[in-house]
Amino acid sequence: MREIRLREALNEAMSEEMRLDKNVFLMGEEVAEYNGAYKVSKGMLDEFGSDRVIDTPISELGFAGIGVGSAMNGLRPIIEFMTWNFAVLAFDQIVNGAAKMLSMTGGQVNCPIVFRGPTGAAGQLGQQHSQTFESWMANVPGLKVISTIDPYDAKGLLKSAIRDNDPVCMMEAETAYSDMGAVPKEEYLVPIGLAKVKREGTDVTIVSYNKSMKVAFEAADELAKEGISAEVIDLRTIRPLDYKTIVESIKKTNRLVTVEEAWPFSSVSSEIAYEIQKYAFDYLDAPVTRITGADTSLGYAPTLVEAYMPNAAKVIKAVKSVLYVS
């Protein structure tokens, strides 16, 4: 397999699906003439033209609504948000429109739409541009939520999302668009709703997603130097969430630490902890422990960013606490 960047994997996914299905189109701010704010749509305007790669005004509520309406009428829009922080303006269309359309019409009208763009902090961008939205979207029945930065997974999952008849929210990461990964040239799909064990281990299970996976891997590497074997699971999909893979891992390791960037209250980790105590309580030798972002808005100063974000040291400390190692 060749090594390509995350932005290139996403570009390939969209382009391949647009070649296969004339009803698929891309719409968002700067996706056409500028090739995308993060160059994810580079070259797509030249190939598909302005009818299918559409620049919009700075009006998230407006173009999200156009996307929902077009999906109801048989098209398959991909709506790119420059950041999910800006998508807050479009939540009415996502939550009250796309997510509820099938239910409100008694199963008569599907809404096959993909909302995608970067989520989470990207350094010193201030409180309003540094929020993490997986748990927000996953709280809404009717939405599917994908969150990954692995180029292989991102391409396969985005292709599956475009083909899905339900609305899908795809969360990426601004700081990961240049990350490299092995991606085959041949067409493939990654099913929505399946987590993946990315590193085998025997002493503790570490569950994470999106760019917090980098923190999990870094912690696992350091723990290995001390003889502690950590199994690392990438959720990849937040809703539906693959509890089976986590439970099977806990049966082996008997301990669970979760890592995510979101705020702790009502987080993805909170949901995992509840379900795991229900389905795997007898296998746990220690309480489920979580590492999250701080329970406050993210400040601008670099020292505040460092204190706020999950890091390997925090994960290592949490792992040792569940192993009762000082």
Image (cartoon, rainbow, N blue to C red):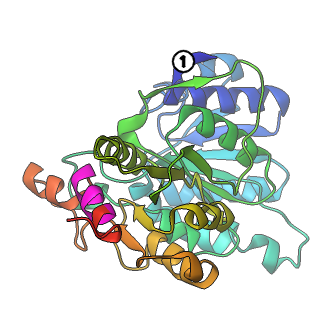
Q: Is residue 47 magenta?
A: no
Location of residue 93 by image quarter: bottom right
Q: Nearer the viewer, residue 261 or 205?
A: 205
Magenta-highlighted residues: 312-319
Task: Estimate the x, y position of residue 306 in percent, counting from the top left.
Answer: 16, 53
Residue 156 to residue 126: above or below: above
Residue 289 to residue 246: above or below: below
What residue appears at the point 50 percent right and 49 percent down from the top-left corner? 201
Left or right: where does residue 38 sit relative to residue 271? Answer: left
Task: Estimate the x, y position of residue 265 in percent, counting from the top left.
Answer: 37, 79
Left or right: where does residue 241 sit relative to residue 323? Answer: right
Which amino acid type is marked by label 1? Answer: Glu
What residue appears at the point 66 percent right and 50 percent down from the top-left corner? 114
Q: Nearer the viewer, residue 74 or 16?
A: 16
The residue to which callout 1 is attached is 3
Left or right: where does residue 42 sit relative to residue 38? Answer: right
Q: Could you tell me which quadrant the C terminus lies in?
A: bottom left
Residue found at the very far right of the displayed protein: 108
Task: Estimate the x, y position of residue 153 in percent, counting from the top left.
Answer: 61, 39
